[in-house]
Every structure is written in structure tokens, then in C-alpha cells.
């Protein structure tokens, strides 16, 4: 049986990623490191081997590094960023890749992959459909372990007007007691809320103020395109569950030490089939992948070489289909991970106990400020 081939774009999220790959960068000024990255061409970071589906199909691939930090993807001209990403795509083509996946900010910049696809001879996918699928799956499972009934929970989506957040909101709206949409652009919020109401008959609450939007919320899915750290300890109620899908992560790292009474999980961690080996250290255990990476692998194993998830308008039908294909080929949710560590069941029990203590230890309650309905 022939081995299908793929490539996937990666890039450093912060200085820790740089140092993990190049220890000599430790202690160097970030400005100097960014200037060096600006001059560097895309390069092969690793060869991925051992992917084998339950069906017997096999795949291999390559991580192609696009050497920009998140701030550079945002600050450089779109033309400059596109040029480097397309150069990375050409490199993937030269290895024989039959499809390319967009990781991190390469799937966010500009038109979310449409221009990239037009400039390559092989199809492109952002991975966002499977990211959404696993975010919902992980949130549902974690809520169950925390003893939460979704139907009685107040839920919120941060970054609700984005390609991932808007679909997560549409899926969660009929499952929760209340859904709040949070984003910076009020007009886009209104349009997203109207679309959800039309499809689900559920009327979301909307707000541009994260302080108001997260007040008294039980379950949060966060998928903003910010530079990270926008959800802080004071935003979270005792017992809250946060599924942080964003890269860089939306939840501030201080929450790990300051709030033992909340559970933060990274959305979209997947266990791969076969003896998959990245030959690259992401800081994850062996055979564990981000969902956006996994989508590219699923499509490769299925021989589905098409522009699967592109642009901002992601279809719920594609989210459901990639979930079915994942099961077909043996991909599955890889438990939970939080602040660089796998989450044990004992940790979830600790969160439940700490939440009880925090709630019973309150001496006063403040009247919540609610976001307004449409």
C-alpha cells in the first residue's frame, strides 16, 4: 500500500519554543532573535513517521518551520507574511507532500488560507474543523467529570466572531442553559448572534467586555486571535471550566498557581494511531498531537486531498465529517492537558473540592453585571 504524504507549518509561539529548538538563544534579547527569524527562510524542522490508520493506510509528513513569532505575523505586511508562508509551501511540495496544513498564525493571517491555497499546486487545510470538534468533545467530557450538567450551565465563547469561536458557539448554544458571545467588534458580534439565533432559535447574550462577559460563567471556550493572556484569575468563578483553544493561549499562566478551584484544559489534544513519531519535541508526550495537525493527518490517511477547511466560514457539516473520519482512522481525544502538564483524574477531584471550599467560604456576593441580549 502506498504511503500518502503531507506537510504541516509550525512556528515559535514564544522564546521558550525558540530555546527548545536552539538552546544557544537562551538569554538573547528578543529583538535580536526576531530580527534573525525575519531573515531566515522556511526550513524542514522534522520528518514525521509511523502514522498508520485502523484501515491499514499509512502516511508520512514533514514539519515546515515558518520562522516568525506571533507578533511578526501580526505586524508585518500581509504581502511579506504570505510570501514566507508560500515559500514554505513550495518546500513542502518539493518533498512530495500531497496536502499542507496551516498551524498557528499561518492559519489566522489574512484570509485564513485562501490566498495560500491559490499560490500552491497542492491543497491546503487550516485544521480548524477538527480543532472545533475536539474542543467540544473535550469540554463535554471535562464538564461531565466535574459533575456539571451542560443543560444547567452558563457558557461563554471568547473570540466568538472568529472562524473557530463562532462555530463552537453555534454548537454549544442549544446544549447550554445560556450562551454568551464575547469579542471586540460589536457589529460582528451582532451578526454572529443573529446567525446563531436563526439556526438554533437560541438568543445569545453579547458583550465586548471580557470582565462582564465571564462573570458567573460555568464553562468557557476561548478561541481568540489575541497575543495571549487575556483571561485572568479575577475573571473566573469557583468551579469554572475553561477550554483554551487559542495559540498563544488565552488563559494567563498565573491562573495555574492562583486558582486551584478552576480547571483549564487545552483544546484539541489528540492521540494518533500507529507508531507515530514526530521526531520533534513539542513538549507533549509521544503520539500526542494538536487537533489542527491531526486534521491534516486524517485527510492524508483518507486520501482526501482537497482544500478542506479554508477561510472564515467553517461549516458545521465539515466539523461533523472530520470527527467521523477521525474515528474511522483511529484518532481519539488524548485526555486533558493544562499548563504544559497532563491532567490526572485526581487533579479534577482537587478542583471540585477547592471550588466547594471557595463557594462555602464566601462572606458576600456581588450583584453580577450581565451582558445584554440582542
Image (cartoon, rainbow, N blue to C red):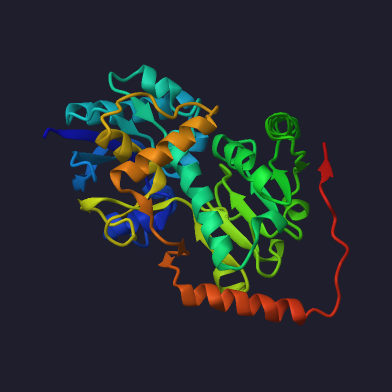
Considering every residue shown, the one lying at the far left of the view is: 1
On screen, 174 above or below 251? above
Quarter occupied by residue 152: bottom right
Which image quarter holds the N terminus? top left
68 in relation to 112, above or below: below
Asked if residue 278 can be seen in this view, the reply is no
Query: Which is nearer the eye, 28 or 286?
Result: 286
In the image, taking residue 257 as reference, residue 272 lies left or right, namely left
Front residue of 17/293: it is 293
Q: Position of residue 91 (x, y in %)?
A: 23, 30
Q: Name the image quarter holding residue 231.
A: bottom right
Judge from the rendering whether residue 268 lies leftward or rightward of residue 312; answer left or right.
left
Give the left or right position of residue 127, taking residue 163 as reference: left
Q: Is residue 337 visible?
A: yes
- Please indicate whether residue 274 sits to the left or right of residue 8 in the image: left
Q: Find the residue positioned furthest to the right.
A: 367
Point out residue 303 in the picture as x, y percentages from the top left corner: 26, 29
Residue closest to the eye, 226 or 242:
242
Residue 4 at x, y percent in the picture: 19, 33
The C terminus lies in quadrant: top right
Residue at left 54%, top 62%?
142
Amino acid at each position: 500500500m502506498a504511503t500518502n504524504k503531507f506537510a504541516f507549518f509550525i512556528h515559535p509561539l514564544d522564546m521558550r519554543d525558540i530555546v527548545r529548538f536552539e538552546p544557544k538563544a537562551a538569554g538573547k534579547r528578543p529583538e535580536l532573535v526576531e530580527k534573525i527569524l525575519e531573515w531566515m527562510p522556511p526550513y524542514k524542522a522534522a520528518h514525521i513517521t509511523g502514522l498508520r490508520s485502523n484501515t491499514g493506510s499509512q502516511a508520512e509528513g514533514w514539519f515546515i518551520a515558518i520562522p516568525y513569532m506571533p507578533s511578526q505575523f501580526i505586524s508585518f505586511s500581509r504581502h511579506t507574511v504570505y510570501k514566507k508562508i508560500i515559500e514554505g509551501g513550495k518546500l513542502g511540495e518539493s518533498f512530495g507532500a500531497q496536502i499542507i496544513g496551516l498551524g498557528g498564525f499561518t492559519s489566522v493571517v489574512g484570509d485564513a488560507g485562501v490566498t495560500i491555497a491559490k499560490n500552491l499546486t497542492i491543497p491546503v487545510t487550516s485544521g480548524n474543523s477538527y480543532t472545533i470538534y475536539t474542543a467540544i468533545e473535550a469540554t463535554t467530557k471535562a464538564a461531565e467529570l466535574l459533575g456539571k450538567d451542560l443543560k444547567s450551565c452558563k457558557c461563554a465563547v471568547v473570540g466568538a466572531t472568529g472562524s473557530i469561536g463562532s462555530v463552537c458557539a453555534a454548537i454549544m448554544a442549544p446544549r447550554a442553559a445560556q450562551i454568551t458571545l464575547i469579542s471586540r467588534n460589536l457589529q460582528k458580534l451582532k451578526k454572529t448572534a443573529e446567525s446563531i439565533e436563526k439556526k438554533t432559535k437560541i438568543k445569545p447574550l453579547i458583550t465586548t467586555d471580557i470582565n462582564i462577559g465571564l462573570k458567573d460563567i460555568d464553562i468557557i471556550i476561548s478561541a481568540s486571535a489575541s497575543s495571549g493572556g487575556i483571561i485572568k484569575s479575577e475573571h473566573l468563578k469557583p468551579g469554572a471550566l475553561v477550554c483554551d483553544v487559542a495559540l498563544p493561549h488565552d488563559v494567563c499562566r498565573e491562573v495555574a498557581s492562583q486558582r486551584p478551584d478552576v480547571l483549564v484544559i487545552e483544546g484539541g489534544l489528540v492521540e494518533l494511531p500507529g507508531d507515530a513519531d514526530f521526531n520533534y519535541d513539542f513538549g507533549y508526550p509521544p503520539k500526542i498531537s494538536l487537533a489542527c495537525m491531526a486534521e491534516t493527518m486524517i485527510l492524508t490517511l483518507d486520501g482526501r486531498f482537497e482544500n478542506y477547511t479554508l477561510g472564515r466560514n467553517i461549516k458545521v457539516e465539515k466539523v461533523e465529517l472530520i470527527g467521523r473520519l477521525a474515528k474511522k482512522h483511529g484518532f481519539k481525544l488524548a485526555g486533558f492537558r493544562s499548563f504544559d502538564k497532563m491532567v490526572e483524574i485526581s487533579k479534577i477531584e482537587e478542583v471540585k473540592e477547592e471550588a466547594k471550599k471557595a463557594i462555602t467560604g464566601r462572606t458576600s456576593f456581588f450583584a453580577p453585571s450581565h451582558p445584554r441580549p440582542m
